[in-house]
Amino acid sequence: MATAGGGGGAGSEVRRTCLLFCFVPLLAGLCQANSVERKIYIPLNRTAPCVRLLNATHQIGCQSSISGDTGVIHVVEEEEDLKWVLTDGPNPPYMVLLEGKLFTRKLMEKLKGTQRISGLAVALSKPSPVDGFSPSVECPNDGFGIYSNSYGSEYAHCKQLKWNPEGNGLAYEDFDFPIFLLEDENETQVIKQCYWDHNRGVNGSAPAYPLCAMQLFSHMHAVTSTVTCMRRSAIQSTFSINPEVVCDPLADFNVWNTLNPLNASGKLEPGDKVIIAATRLDSRSFFWNVAPGAESAVGSFITQLAVAEALQKAPDVASLPRNVMFVFFQGETFDYIGSSRMVFDMEKGKFPVQLENIHSFVELGQVALRNSSDLWMHTDPMSQRDESIHTEVMYIYK
Ligand SMILES: *[C@@H]1O[C@H](CO)[C@@H](O)[C@H](O)[C@H]1NC(C)=O
Ligand SMILES: *[C@@H]1O[C@H](CO)[C@@H](O)[C@H](O)[C@H]1NC(C)=O
Ligand SMILES: *[C@@H]1O[C@H](CO)[C@@H](O)[C@H](O)[C@H]1NC(C)=O
Ligand SMILES: *[C@@H]1O[C@H](CO)[C@@H](O)[C@H](O)[C@H]1NC(C)=O
Ligand SMILES: *[C@@H]1O[C@H](CO)[C@@H](O)[C@H](O)[C@H]1NC(C)=O
């Protein structure tokens, strides 16, 4: 093992004698430039970072410092192994390699409360946890749904039912160290091997140098809140010769169409009613571009596309009593931004269909990849307080 230069001070010993792993983008340049680096670094090729997200008031997610974070690797396979990281180990900061099954709120809270760790790599949990896993909250998008303190308050804030009971809320926490997912078991094994070879002291004593370390790099410029970040972005692009994007707004498009043609430049007559069939296009996950939640979104929007195609082929489609509008909403995971925007446009008269043109609203949730063949249908108790609507809904049930 070769040595890389290091200055004086407490942390330098670790730096002087490290075998470094890292997230590729950092190393690509270095590796070509320096053959010593190439010998002591092994790039990790299949990783996914947890990223920084902002809302109007807060920041959530994770990032590394500007040049990446480095620490001595410690493998945590059982909860007891954490003691070394939190109190006993003599070489902090540590880079924790965590078994997927231990990626829980309880354990993450312990890691958040310490200065002794510089980053976390989570090994993919295989098989998936039997009890399920959700980094979202128990009551997702609370405060942005149709029920609020002024409408259906008895249903607001999941008072009747926590609809995501597994939710541990980790996706809404702010972490001050980088967190990565290791997607490839073989790469995880390479890291573990390095740990076993170099970082385990004999009979519980402190291990001797050289030690095996890991560097995680996922720096992002976004900080504090959307307001701060957009202001910095604006300053950057106004005064800088090489403007740097500090943060990107979450933006995309809703997709919609109707079964029978609509004059998109005009407006529907008040008596002209349409049925809206809606579904969502997005899902969110803790790690960038690793989206197990897509199963739910894809299952429902493919189904809706199939319905649209089948209905459009029906010979008597032009004579249907009501037009059907198919909508695919984007950004629903984040406070329903897609559907909220459409309603906003309808209210401002910037959309051919107005709110009073909506006869009924049907939303398709997860209809595929279920364990049983049961399908659930939920109706809105508030609108059914109107007797005629209640009768009509009951008719559909039969
Ligand atoms: C922003 O996110 C934080 C953390 O999830 C939350 O507590 C806060 O209410 C959010 N603010 C707004 C305006 O939605
Ligand atoms: C891991 O390595 C084994 C043996 O070299 C190989 O058969 C397997 O396909 C590899 N797995 C992945 C995910 O690359
Ligand atoms: C990642 O890919 C590089 C180049 O193919 C290889 O040298 C390196 O060993 C890989 N990393 C791991 C951890 O397998
Ligand atoms: C470790 O401990 C065991 C049992 O206490 C002992 O037999 C062994 O010699 C020790 N190894 C070293 C390297 O000290
Ligand atoms: C569509 O609506 C616009 C504005 O009301 C109107 O000028 C135009 O003639 C309409 N086109 C058709 C095909 O009805």
Image: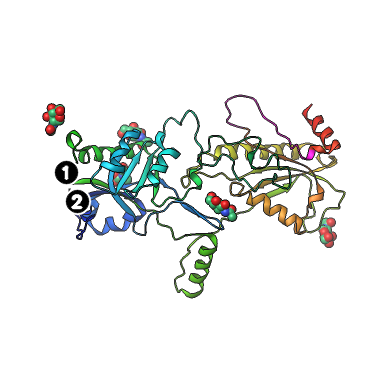
Residue 373 among those drawn in magenta: yes
Side of 221 relative to 204 (left or right): right
Q: Position of residue 285 (x, y in %)?
A: 50, 43
Whole-angstrom CA distance, mark 2 to mark 1, is 11 Å
Q: Amino acid at mark 2?
A: Thr
Q: Residue at x 63, y 24 (%)?
A: 373
Badge 1 element: loop
- Percent position (x, y) of residue 99? 37, 36
Say few, some or many: other residues with alpha carbon within 10 Å of mark 1 (under 14 / 14 to 19 / 20 or more). few
The dot on residue 208 is 1
Magenta stretch bounds: 368-383
Q: Is residue 263 left or right of residue 21?
A: right
Tell me where residue 195 appears, x and y as whole percent. Answer: 25, 40
Mark 2 lies on residue: 17
- Which quadrant holds residue 323? top right
For mark 2, give the secondary structure. loop
* Residue occupying image coordinates x 48% and y 46%: 289
Taking the image as four quarters, which one is ligand 3 found in? Answer: top left
Q: Position of residue 389 (x, y in %)?
A: 83, 37
Res 254 seen here: no
Q: Residues within 10 Å of mark 2 (few under 14, many from 20)?
A: many
Q: Main secondary structure of the magenta part?
A: loop
